[in-house]
Amino acid sequence: MASTRQIDQQRPAETTELSLASGENKEGPASLNQVPPLSGYNLFLSDTTLSQAIVREGAGWAREQISEFGRLLGTDEVQRWGFDANENKPVLHTHDRYGNRRDEVIFHPSWHSLMRMSVENRLHNLPWEANKSGAHVARAALMMLAAQNEAGHTCPISMTFSAVAALRVDPALAHEWEPKIFSASYDPRFVPSQEKAGVLLGMGMTEKQGGSDVRANITRAERIGNSREYLITGHKWFCSAPMCDAFLILAQTGNGLSCFLLPRWTPAGNKNKFHLQRLKDKLGNRSNASSEVEFAQAWAQLVGEEGRGIQTIIEMVNHTRLDCSIAAAGLMRQALVQAMHHASHRKAFGKLLMDQPLMRNVLADLALESEAATLLMVRVAKSFDVRNTNDQERAFCRIVTAIAKYWLCKRSPAAVGEALECLGGNGYVEESMMPRLYREAPLYSIWEGSGNVICLDVLRALAKEPATVDALLNELKSVAGKGQRLDNYVLALQDRLASKSNGGVAEYSARELTEKLALALQASLMVRYSSSHAAEAFIGSRLAGQHGHAFGTLPAGVNVAGILETAGMAQ
Ligand SMILES: Cc1cc2nc3c(=O)[nH]c(=O)nc-3n(C[C@H](O)[C@H](O)[C@H](O)COP(=O)(O)OP(=O)(O)OC[C@H]3O[C@@H](n4cnc5c(N)ncnc54)[C@H](O)[C@@H]3O)c2cc1C
């Protein structure tokens, strides 16, 4: 079990020699009471909750790879890639010097380094390619670690991974594309996919008139003869990672909204009529390009059946929702690690921040949030691993994907914001990484179904798929008798679900219900897998009302030292 003391021991000697916390200063006054850089540590080994979870949930076979990945992410070099890729935003070239369409985005070399690292570690295909028990959990751990260093590049990684689920609706297309998706070679060249060692896929659903309500899409698809080939005319208002090799998009046919695979190059080797209009100037996620695109009779192939576009692409969306939860948990963990590191080295009023009782309350509260987030995220990933062989897990997966997506993405901006404040003014400065984490955090709640839309999806599942109610209650009851407060909370939820699944839930209350379901699930996971003092503190603060509205309002009597120890903090 690694602690932050161990993290510090792993750092290069010249860094650890700077005993800045004691006020000694080898580098002149500028370094007085400043915190040494947090690098040269292993993001995985220092995360007790994640390390234990992957072994428990059947991904122990990947431990060595995940550990090496965690080590790599903690190096100066890879940390630098994250900064450089965000400080040097991608640049769109719509035309060449002669006025011909070019439709190409140029990235900083650090973006490609990040992409290569993640592709070589199979973050974009592991569960499909390895086809091994526990592979979703293993990949979730890798994704959570990658997001902690640089989350922007995980967008095309996630879409490629997720697209396989939708492509498999169409075995012929899956057969054609999977070999190159399953490659561990990152090939960023803008050439036809036939010439490439490996490919990446994106997704285009959102149009100007709406993203949540994709039925309002106006992009049209005209069939070419009797083939499964179509010409697409229209636009997408958000199309991320436009240098992907192909996109799953939605367009209207005579039979309704349908799903298509639209490559950047046609089979004849010509550039497809996929015209990049401009790149979005975004709050965060700056390393990644998100574009507006127009299709001028672009060539595409039907995926699945005409009129079943939403049913086809929803398989992809469910996987990207899983990834939103993973990234949210990753951002919370990294923010916590940065805050704990700072507090362990920075002094105020004659004492380390880590030794100040109120700061300990804040950090322990953030640690509880992070631990519960990691446990829930891993539980969702596990349900993806086992859902094909277990009906109850399939139903559980259906509902918990949405619940976790809503709640973890909702908690992450608040937790990251609070962690940022632990660094004081330094947390507001780009070099600390905290502003980047903070800007990234709200994104996961917006895409792949914004908060309200996800909560309405939870209601829909509860009302129309009664097996989801049973699966949820079975999961929650697995800890029945382990504590009165959680038992009472679950009983109250059970009563609500009994009436709601029959009568339909008021949309007005969807957030409140989803939040309670998420908290009950997190509490049950804490009871099963965390220390008893952490589980008690979580239940007391989150379920039993012993908490204020901000972090740092844990009640007296909580075992703060124990919680911080698990989070990786030496006492
Ligand atoms: C950086 C970035 C990258 C993106 N990349 C892609 C991409 O690659 N591909 C892609 O297809 N899309 C992409 N998107 C778009 C994203 O998925 C949409 O923005 C999102 O789905 C919301 O759609 P919208 O923006 O049209 O908002 P709207 O649909 O207009 O929704 C606005 C708000 O209303 C709420 N709302 C909607 N319906 C209801 C209701 N019935 N009841 C209550 N509240 C409701 C929503 O929850 C939301 O908060 C990206 C977005 C961003 C920010």
Image (tube, helix red, strand yellow):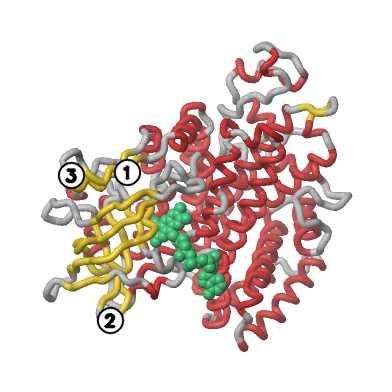
Residue denoted by label 3: 99
Of pointers 3 and 1, the one earlier in the residue sequence: 1
Would you call the spot at circle 1 few (<14 residues within 10 Å), some (14-19), or many (20 or more)?
A: some
Of pointers 2 and 1, the one earlier in the residue sequence: 1
**In the rendering, at what x and y percent does residue 499 appear?**
67, 85
What residue sits 48% from the left and 46% below the top? 285
Q: Is 438 on the left-hand or right-hand side of 85?
A: right
Q: CA distance from mark 3 to mark 1?
A: 14 Å
Q: CA distance from mark 2 to mark 1?
A: 36 Å
Q: Residue furthest bottom?
A: 503
Q: Is 287 on the left-hand or right-hand side of 46?
A: left
Residue denoted by label 1: 92
User: For residue 191, which numbered disc appears in the image?
Assistant: none
**In the rendering, at what x and y percent does residue 548 appear?**
80, 56
Q: Is residue 555 above or below residue 568?
A: below
Q: Nearer the viewer, residue 547 or 47?
A: 547
Mark yes or no: residue 507 visible: yes
The kind of residue tagged 2 is Asn
The kind of residue tagged 3 is Gly
Q: Residue furthest right?
A: 556
Would you call the spot at circle 2 few (<14 residues within 10 Å), some (14-19), or many (20 or more)?
A: few
User: For residue 255, which numbered disc appears in the image?
Assistant: 2
Q: Is 378 on the left-hand or right-hand side of 242?
A: right
What residue sits 59% from the left and 45% below the top? 438
Q: Nearer the viewer, residue 237 or 539?
A: 237
- The quarter of the picture where the N terminus appears is top right
